[in-house]
Structures are given as C-alpha cells and as structure tokens.
C-alpha cells in the first residue's frame, strides 16, 4: 500500500510545506490561554488561528462545521499532490477518523440547551447533521468528488490510524483502487478543558517549557489541539499505472484494546507492547514516532516498550511536543510526519523536554538529519484502543 499524496491543516501549519519547516526546526506551535479552565487557570492549546480562507467566500460552506472544513482543506491538498482527477471514474473509498466530531460547535451546544428548554423553534435544520459524525466524512467526500465507499471511524485518538487500517483492507481485496484517508478534530473550548481537567489529563498552570511535554516527569498532562491530515493510499500497481511519484509505503497497521473497566485505565501497557511487537516483526526501525503526550501513565508505557523491545537502542520522538494532541487526527499526522522524515532525511525532535524520569530512553531532542528508511508509529486512544503502524521508504 503506497502513499501518493498528503495534506495537512494544524496549529501554525497551513500546508505540508509549513509542516515540514516546523518539524525540521522544532517550532513550538502551542500557546497559553486562561479563558477555558474552571478557575481561570492557564492551559496550553494548539489552535489554528489562521482562518480557512478558501471557504470564506463560498456561501455553500457558511454553515459547515469547522472540523469539516479542515478535513476538506487537507483532502484538497492531498488530492492535488496525487494528481487525482475525475474521481467518479475510479473505485475510490473515503475513510475518516474523528474522536469528537462537531460537539464543539456553537450550533451543537446551543441546540442542546434549547432542547432542554423545549425551544423547538430555535433548533436549526442543520442540527441533526452536527450530531452525526458521519456527516463530516460524507461532506468531505462530496467536496472532493468521491461517491464510493465512505466510512467514519471513531476510536478516540487512534481513529485516523485505524481509518488507514480499514482502508488497507478494502484496497487489498480489490473493492477500491484509491483510498482517501484522513483524520480531523477540533475541540478547543470549555467543554474539553473542563472534561479533561476532571481526569487530570491536561496541563494546567504550567509554562510552555514545563506543560504538555512528552517524556518529562514535570509535565502534568497534554495540550488540547486541533488539526486535520489526509493521505492518498493506492495499491502499488495502480500508482505505477498512473506514473505518479510514490512517497512511501504503509506496510501494516495493528490495533487492539486494553479491555479494562470503562472508568479505569490500563497502566501496564501490555496491549501496547503487544501491538507494537506485532507490527515490528522483530525489526528495528530508524525511530519510533511516539504517541507520548505528557501524561505520565501514557509516556511510561512508551518507556516500557522502548526497554522491552529495543533495550532503549532505538530513538524515540513525539511531535506532540510541538503540536499538542489533536485527538482523532493525531495518528494521521504522525504518519505524514514519518513520510516527510523518510523523504527529507531527518528525525523531528521532542522539543522542551529535559528527559527527567526518562533518562534511559534514546529521546531525540534536537533535529537529527540522517537517512531514514523505516518508522514505527504508536497511538493510544481514550477508550483503550492502541494502534501501531509501520512506515517504509518505497523501493
């Protein structure tokens, strides 16, 4: 399964070119805000401050959720790079992952209040689509001109990586020739901050140097972020027939679930170790593009993987030190990052960490420019899913 295009929208990241610059230069795309938390505490967020200009003048998109517009923008960039024209003439599947859908939209939240107050007249006709996650994917598919198989995957922060897993199945069995695979999530508001503050998962009253830092004992949690990413997947023979440049290969995606009680979490990391071990098949990649977010339980599971599977010999890094955690879009961003590092020869850094508590690990803290042939990706989702991918240079 080969990649022929990719696109992205994220904090301080309007396109692939800007993502590459940020990764190579270790740019911190986070900011501090104090208007979202329960008691005015400062929190860290990764926000797309630049408007989605391409949709502002088109009345058709005026009432579209932000999360949908982000997916449309990333998808357009990916399709343009892959030089896909007339999708109606091809067997195309669209697979998108999202964790929170449109729940952050003002229309969604105000409609819930109006329902509770029996204000039927105030409910907009769009409300049923805002509560339906699949409306996001179908709107993106329509915008991109695809009318074939269309699927929405929602498994927490593993959603977009598991969207790739599903797409590979459809490609392998021949039901489709091209897969447009992405992830999109946008929820930076009080609802997200209040919810994750309750579970002590986000960094509150921490500086940009201390908070939301992967592989740091000082970090008290992650930074809420928003982003969208898309890759174009094809079978090798189909891409060669189109004479299109191949950007890399996604060899496999393995996923499982921790299988624990709803309101608890697995601190052992057994299932993450199992998923990573299965996708590795006794190989040592050039580095691990890690799911580490600055939550101690999660990051220590990565430490266990590093020790048991590699004896801390393989480099680890986490782009979430730069971009925060964009929920269900995180896996696709890690895949795109891995492909960029393969094509441009570098390992992106885990910025801001002092490695306290993780000194044994081989953590990359400044950009390493070197040949990269293979990368393993790890993700973990709210709800207990683990998903790992193996990315390779195309030869």
Image (tube, rainbow, N blue to C red):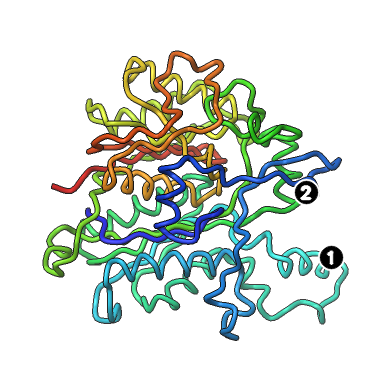
Q: Name the residue tied to disc 2.
A: 36
- Taking 233 as reference, is 357 above or below it? above
Q: CA distance from mark 1 to mark 2?
A: 24 Å
User: What is the secondary structure assignment of the residue under circle 1?
Assistant: helix
Residue 334: image x %, image y %? 41, 45
Q: Point out the tag, 1 or 2, that comes first from the N-terminus.
A: 2
* Residue 116: assigned label: 1
How would you rate the neighbour count of disc 1 (Cα within 10 Å): few for under 14, some for 14-19, many for 20 or more?
few
Q: Nearer the viewer, mark 1 or mark 2?
A: 2
Tell me if label 1 and label 2 are in contact, CB under 8 Å: no
Residue shown at the point (27%, 34%) measured from the top left: 370
Residue 61 screen position, x and y as percent: 58, 79
Is 213 placed above or below 132 here? above
Q: Which mark is residue 391?
A: none
In the picture provided, is 216 more to the left or to the right than 330? right
**Which quadrant of the view contains residue 55?**
bottom right
Q: Residue at x 56, y 40 (%)?
A: 383
Given residues 140 and 151, the one toward you in this image is 140
Across and down, in percent, residue 322 comes to 53, 41
Q: Position of residue 332 (x, y in %)?
A: 42, 50
């Amino acid at each position: 399964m080969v990649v022929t295009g990719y696109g992205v929208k994220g904090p301080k990241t309007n396109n692939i070119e800007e993502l590459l610059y940020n990764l190579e230069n270790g740019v911190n795309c986070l900011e501090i805000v104090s208007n979202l938390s329960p008691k005015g505490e400062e929190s860290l967020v990764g926000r797309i401050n630049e408007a989605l200009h391409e949709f502002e003048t088109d009345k058709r998109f005026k009432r579209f959720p932000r999360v949908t517009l982000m997916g449309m923008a990333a998808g357009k960039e990916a399709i343009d790079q892959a030089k896909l024209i007339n999708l109606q003439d091809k067997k195309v599947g669209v697979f998108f992952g999202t964790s929170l859908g449109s729940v952050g939209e003002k229309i969604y939240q105000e409609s819930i209040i109006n329902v509770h107050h029996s204000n039927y007249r105030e409910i907009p006709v769009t409300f049923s689509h805002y509560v339906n996650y699949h409306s996001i994917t179908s709107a993106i598919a329509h915008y991109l001109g695809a009318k074939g198989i269309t699927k929405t995957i929602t498994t927490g922060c593993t959603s977009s990586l598991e969207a790739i897993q599903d797409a590979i199945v459809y490609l392998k069995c021949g039901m489709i020739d091209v897969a447009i695979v992405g992830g999109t999530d946008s929820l930076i508001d009080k609802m997200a901050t209040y919810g994750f503050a309750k579970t002590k998962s986000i960094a509150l009253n921490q500086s940009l140097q201390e908070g939301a830092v992967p592989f740091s004992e000082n970090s008290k949690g992650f930074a809420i972020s928003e982003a969208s990413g898309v890759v174009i997947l094809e079978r090798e023979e189909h891409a060669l027939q189109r004479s299109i440049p191949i950007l890399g290969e996604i060899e496999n995606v393995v996923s499982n679930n921790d299988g624990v009680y709803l309101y608890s979490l697995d601190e052992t990391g057994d299932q993450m170790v199992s998923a990573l071990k299965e996708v590795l098949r006794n190989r040592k990649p050039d580095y691990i593009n890690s799911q580490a977010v600055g939550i101690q339980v999660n990051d220590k599971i990565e430490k266990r993987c590093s020790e048991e599977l590699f004896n801390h010999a393989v480099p680890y890094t986490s782009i979430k030190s730069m971009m925060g955690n964009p929920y269900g879009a995180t896996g696709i961003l890690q895949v795109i990052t891995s492909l960029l590092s393969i094509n441009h020869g570098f390992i992106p850094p885990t910025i801001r960490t002092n490695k306290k508590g993780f000194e044994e690990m081989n953590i990359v803290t400044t950009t390493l420019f070197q040949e990269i042939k293979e990368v393993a990706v790890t993700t973990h989702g709210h709800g207990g899913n683990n998903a790992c991918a193996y990315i390779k240079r195309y030869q």
